């Protein structure tokens, strides 16, 4: 239902989406399509062919200057010094406690020029947080209004996009990007995504977004490309065990509890949260975010209470029926001693305890 | 009946919670309407009381879940559950494909046929959802 009052923020594509008959919803203050045809059809199209998402609501923060690397290193736990220009990394803006201000992508555009892509609902908070840490010769700009973003995801993504880009895409590896013209507009083309499939995220000025969206739909029509909404984005990312800020991770969950020890680079030097994460790593996190499948019938949902060994132990953080895995799946924080595949626990589904079992994740991985 | 027809058969009775009821020989067949399945989207799970359970008209008696949402369903009428649609456990999407036919939920032995008077006709229901949509 569209909310009656309050101006929702819109992306450059909202008029087109209305014409296409998309179902638009209020997502974190943005009017965005939740589905075009059917969440399951869109999800399966991304797995088998390709899907096109408008993710222009995501925030972009530019950090540049001689002290740009120092600032990025101070506010994130991964090691941005390992990035050469043209490389990107997944990382976390950490609090002193080692919890999430946000989970983000960092793009190194040149030695002294970084682009940080952040969750829409956190953009203002992240910008204030980063700006407050800036020291020396560095400029921090909330550039969110100057960037639109389209995500083209799925095994046919490269073939579809190649028709609109002169540079060869076959050699562009995951977490690498180029700056080039796409459909005549200077854009960042990044081999990244949030679906568990091969694909690209394309950053461009908002004025070019509607043209590019339509050009991609035309180029993709013979490849089985479907326009996709937030519904499919959520089921795709959950099957791939990618986390959603505000559901799975937030300022109360640590990076290590979330299972991201691989991007906690204690050896890189000082950063916010390093002491806490160092101590936590030594003794091991008290709980871990684990993937589970339902054994009993039912669909786990965000917020459903979980009991492990009879003890209340938090809530389901994400849950759905995975359209590709065809099972009821979810994520939940489980006390560390029980956090291993095979452990059974109870999910309370509207007053009834249903059995679930921890399983290895991701729930889905594409064939290589 | 395909998704998108948006029609509401005249021989059915309707509730404000978007269930339909077809009555024949004191037995009511219950489902959810085209409007309900369309609003919900892809249905992935259905929970209804087993045969032999009593249901009370107007009260919640189960849930229909789509990928994104849980929707409670309400008994159009009081009585005893005679049969649950055996197809729905394995193929809940049948409700999207054929909400008035193969996608029926359950059959109820009516306790009091007078309760039928409180339900809407197809014309009344059409008007009701037009108002709800605005």
Image (spheres, coloured by chain):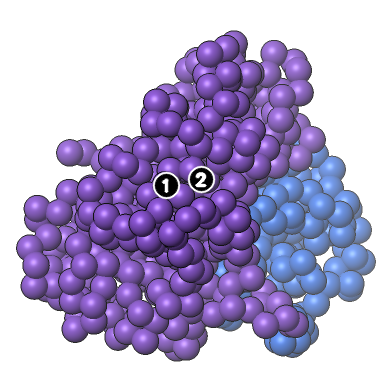
Chain colours: A purple, B blue
Quarter of the image for residue A314 reads top right
Percent coordinates x, y for residue A92 in the rendering: 49, 43
Q: Identify which residue, A6 or A131, lies in the foreground.
A: A131
Q: Identify which residue, A69 or A235, lies in the foreground.
A: A69
Q: Identify which residue, A195 or A252, lies in the foreground.
A: A252
* Residue A305 numbered tag: none
Q: Chain of mark 2?
A: A
Count residues near mark 1 (Cα–Cα under 10 Å), then give few for <14, some for 14-19, many for 20+: many
B78 relative position to A94: left or right: right
Question: Is A101 drawn above or below residue A151 in the view shown?
Answer: above
Which residue does the image show at 28% across and 60% down from the upper left? A109
Percent coordinates x, y for residue A295 in the rendering: 55, 26
Which residue does the image show at 48% across and 33% down from the upper left? A270
Task: Say whether residue A34 is visible.
Answer: yes
Question: Is A243 drawn above or below residue B108 in the view shown?
Answer: above
Percent coordinates x, y for residue A35 in the rendering: 48, 68
Which residue does the image show at 40% across and 55% down from the upper left? A68
A368 relative position to B35: left or right: left
Quarter of the image for residue A304 reads top right
Which residue does the image show at 53% across and 22% down from the upper left? A278
Q: Nearer the viewer, mark 2 or mark 1?
A: 1
A231 relative position to A223: left or right: right
Q: SS of the residue at dot 2?
A: helix
Query: Would you name the residue on which mark 2 appears?
Result: A75
Question: Is B94 drawn above or below residue A315 in the view shown?
Answer: below
Question: Is A366 drawn above or below residue B13 in the view shown?
Answer: above
Query: Would you name the residue on which mark 1 appears?
Result: A70
Q: Chain of mark 1?
A: A
């Amino acid at each position: 239902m569209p909310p009656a009052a309050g101006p929702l923020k819109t992306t450059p594509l909202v008029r087109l989406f209305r014409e296409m008959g998309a179902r638009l919803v209020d997502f974190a203050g943005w009017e965005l399509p939740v589905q075009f045809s059917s969440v399951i059809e869109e999800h399966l199209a991304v797995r088998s062919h390709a899907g096109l998402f408008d993710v222009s609501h995501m925030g972009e923060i530019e950090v540049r200057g001689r002290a740009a690397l120092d600032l990025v290193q101070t506010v994130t736990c991964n090691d941005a010094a390992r990035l050469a220009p043209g490389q990107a990394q997944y990382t976390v803006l950490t609090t002193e406690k080692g919890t999430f201000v946000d989970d983000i992508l960092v793009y190194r555009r040149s030695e002294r020029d970084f682009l940080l892509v952040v969750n829409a609902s956190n953009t203002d908070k992240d910008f204030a947080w980063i700006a407050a840490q800036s020291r020396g010769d560095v400029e921090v700009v909330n550039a969110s209004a100057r960037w639109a973003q389209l995500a083209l995801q799925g095994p046919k993504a490269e073939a579809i996009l190649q028709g609109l880009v002169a540079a060869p895409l076959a050699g562009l590896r995951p977490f690498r990007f180029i700056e080039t013209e796409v459909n005549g507009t200077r854009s960042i083309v990044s081999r990244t995504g949030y679906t568990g499939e091969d694909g690209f995220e394309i950053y461009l000025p908002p004025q070019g977004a509607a043209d590019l969206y339509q050009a991609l739909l035309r180029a993709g029509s013979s490849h089985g490309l479907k326009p996709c909404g937030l519904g499919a984005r959520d089921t795709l990312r959950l099957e791939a065990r990618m986390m959603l800020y505000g559901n799975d991770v937030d300022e109360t969950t640590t990076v290590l509890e979330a299972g991201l020890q691989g991007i906690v680079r204690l050896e890189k030097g000082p950063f916010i949260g390093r002491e806490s994460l160092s101590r936590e790593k030594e003794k091991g996190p008290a709980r871990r975010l684990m993937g589970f499948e339902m054994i009993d019938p039912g669909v786990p949902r965000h917020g459903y209470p979980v009991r492990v060994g009879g003890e209340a132990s938090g809530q389901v953080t994400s849950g759905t029926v995975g359209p590709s895995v065809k099972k009821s799946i979810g994520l939940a924080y489980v006390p560390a001693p029980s956090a291993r595949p095979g452990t059974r626990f109870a999910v309370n589904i509207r007053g009834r305890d249903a059995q679930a079992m921890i399983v290895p994740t991701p729930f889905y991985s594409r064939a290589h | 009946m395909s998704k998108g027809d948006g029609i509401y058969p005249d021989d059915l009775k309707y509730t404000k919670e978007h269930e339909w009821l077809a009555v024949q020989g004191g037995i009511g067949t219950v489902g959810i309407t085209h409007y309900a399945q369309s609003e919900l989207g892809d249905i992935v799970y259905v929970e209804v009381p087993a045969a032999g359970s009593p249901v009370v008209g107007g009260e919640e008696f189960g849930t229909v879940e789509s990928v994104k949402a849980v929707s409670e369903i309400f008994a159009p009428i009081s009585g005893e559950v005679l049969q649950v649609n055996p197809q729905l456990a394995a193929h809940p999407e049948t409700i999207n494909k054929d909400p008035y036919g193969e996608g029926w939920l359950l059959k109820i032995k009516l306790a009091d046929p007078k309760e039928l008077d409180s339900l809407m006709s197809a014309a009344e229901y059409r008007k009701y959802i037009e108002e709800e949509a605005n």
